[in-house]
Amino acid sequence: MRLIFAGTPEFAARALEALIAAGHTIALVLTQPDRPAGRGMKLTPSPVKTVALHHGLPVYQPLTLREAELQAPLRAVSAEAMIVAAYGLILPQAVLDIPARGCINLHASLLPRWRGAAPIQRAILAGDAETGITLMQMDAGLDTGAMLSRHPLAIGAEETAGQLHDRLAALGAEAIVALLPRLAEVVGEPQETRLATYAAKIDKAQAHLDWQQPALALLRQVRAYNPVPGAWTLLDGQPFKVWQAETMACAVRAAPPGTVLRADGEGIEVACATGGLRLLEVQAAGGKRLSAAAFLAGRAVAAGSVLV
């Protein structure tokens, strides 16, 4: 099939690779403009652009697609369909109407649950037992189009957002390749709006651990914000990231929330509103990610210290 592909991060790059391997003709690749990255803030291409250039595909990086003249390159390639995966630009109706068979979105949740920008993190934060991939016929709404196929995936009890992302990326790539040969015969299923939830974008402030919360809720934060932006707290007034943790039994009101109960080779144990959290992998400001044991070998954390 002759396709336009629109996507930006690694999640989308996996789908693009799969479509190329399946023999589809990628007439044009849309992706976000190169962004500064790394210590030197050097302009860096997106993962999707990297894949496209490796395969010699034409790349288009508009800042917007709202003006008719910016839509002209899409019209010129006469694509049958456009595959969209975490592209990062809103597509106006005029763009959705360009491909003969419309635009198909590859979304990392079981719609209508977790429409929006951060479905993987929100599913973990909510304690969902499963998530998945939905292939959706795009319309002008935010992830509101008819569902072409849904692919459930169980969420591991200790799984981080990064680990779940990788499994969903692989599942999404398989799902879109499987759908396209039968696209003409698939009838979309309308979403039940009453079941919709919204996955708002994550920012660094939301990753601040509030020790007044139960230990289980804090553990979900640690998992959901690994690898980006990283769950954090303050130790001696300095940012202190928590990359891995586990809940632990804790005597009722053993100490005020945020109090370090114990710090040794097994981890740094912190009182929560209910229960406790044992920190297993941490990172001090300006330092490297370390096991709690390795961190404590170079810096003492006394029982009674308070994380805020």
Image (spheres, rainbow, N blue to C red):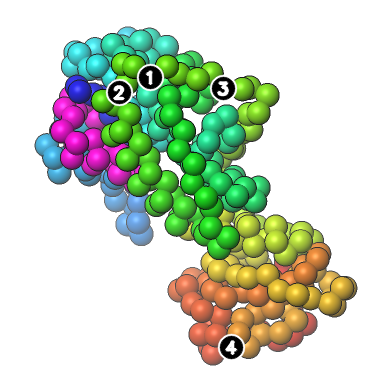
In which quadrant is the C terminus drawn? bottom right
Secondary element at image label 1: loop
Residue mark closest to the camera, 3 vs 2? 2
Residue type at numbered disc 2: Arg
Mark 4 or mark 2: whose residue is earlier in sequence: 2
Q: Residue at x 53, y 43 (%)?
A: 131
What x and y, as percent, mark residue 306?
Answer: 75, 74
- C-alpha distance separating marks 4 and 1: 56 Å
- Check disc 4 and report its element: helix, strand or loop: loop
Q: Residue at x 51, y 26 (%)?
A: 143
Left or right: where does residue 196 sit relative to residue 39? Answer: right
- What percent of the width, then of the height, locates residue 286? 49, 71
Does 166 sit above or below residue 149?
below
The three-letter code of the residue at mark 3 reads: Gln
- Say above or below: 152 vs 101: below
The magenta segment: 10-31
Q: Residue tagged by mark 2?
A: 182
Secondary-structure class at tag 3? loop
Q: Name the residue under label 1.
A: 186
Mark 3: few/some/many CA within 10 Å (<14, 14-19, 20+): some
In terms of image quadrants, where is residue 63?
Answer: top left
**Lower sequence index among marks 1 and 3:** 1
Residue type at mark 4? Gly
* Res 225 seen here: no
**Quadrant containing the N terminus in the rendered view:** top left
Residue placed farthest to the right in the image?
253
Contact between marks 3 and 2 (CB within 8 A): the answer is no
Q: Distance between the residues labelled 3 and 2?
A: 21 Å
For label 4, the residue is 265
Q: Mark 3 points at which residue?
A: 191
Gap between marks 2 and 1 measured at Cα: 7 Å
Separation of marks 1 and 3 at Cα, in angstroms: 15 Å
